[in-house]
Amino acid sequence: MTTDVTNATETTFDEEVLGSDKPVIVDFWAEWCGPCHMVSPALHQIADERADELRLVKVNIDDQPGLARRYGVMSIPAIVLFKDGEPAAATLGAQPKSSIERALGLATA
């Protein structure tokens, strides 16, 4: 099963992320970013495993610089977990899936 991943824009971000009825992992990335491509499979795996609990939304910072500014994204990959329309946890850089889950508060004991 592959989770449906949304590419958010400045026009759709509020509805896709802030208005979501479940938590949303937002992956701030860019096409030229090697570590972004390295971390992407782990994010998809997390989203697949928790498809009924959360969503994965990707924001290409080259295409959507306003969103990067809005959330203070200075380096990528920046992975932010939004809950109830607010950033709840975040992590930077390419990391293994378990580290991402711990950083976002998704790790099971």
Image: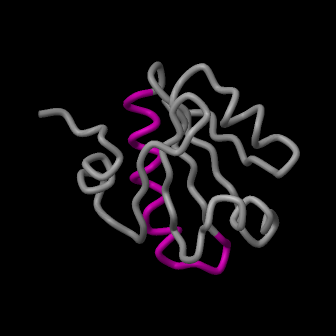
Total residue callouts: 0
On the picture, is 26 further left or further right than 104? right
Above or below, 88 relative to 3: below
Above or below, 86 relative to 37: above
Colour pattern: one colour
On the picture, is 94 further left or further right than 84? left
Above or below, 70 relative to 13: below
On the picture, is 36 further left or further right than 105? right
Question: Does the magenta segment cover residue 1?
Answer: no
Q: Quadrant of the C terminus?
A: top left
Q: What residue range appears in magenta? A: 30-50
Q: Position of residue 52 (x, y in %)?
A: 47, 19
Q: Position of residue 54 (x, y in %)?
A: 49, 29
Residue at the far left: name it. Answer: 109
* Main secondary structure of the magenta stretch: helix
Task: In this rendered view, identify the residue nearer to me: 40 or 105.
Answer: 105
Q: Residue at x 54, y 76 (%)?
A: 75
Q: Residue at x 62, y 44 (%)?
A: 57
Q: Position of residue 63 (x, y in %)?
A: 81, 66
Residue at the far right: name it. Answer: 11
Question: Does the magenta segment cover residue 44?
Answer: yes
Q: Residue at x 44, y 33 (%)?
A: 48
- Asked which quadrant contains residue 72, the reply is bottom right
Q: Residue at x 50, y 51 (%)?
A: 80
Q: Position of residue 96 (x, y in %)?
A: 28, 60
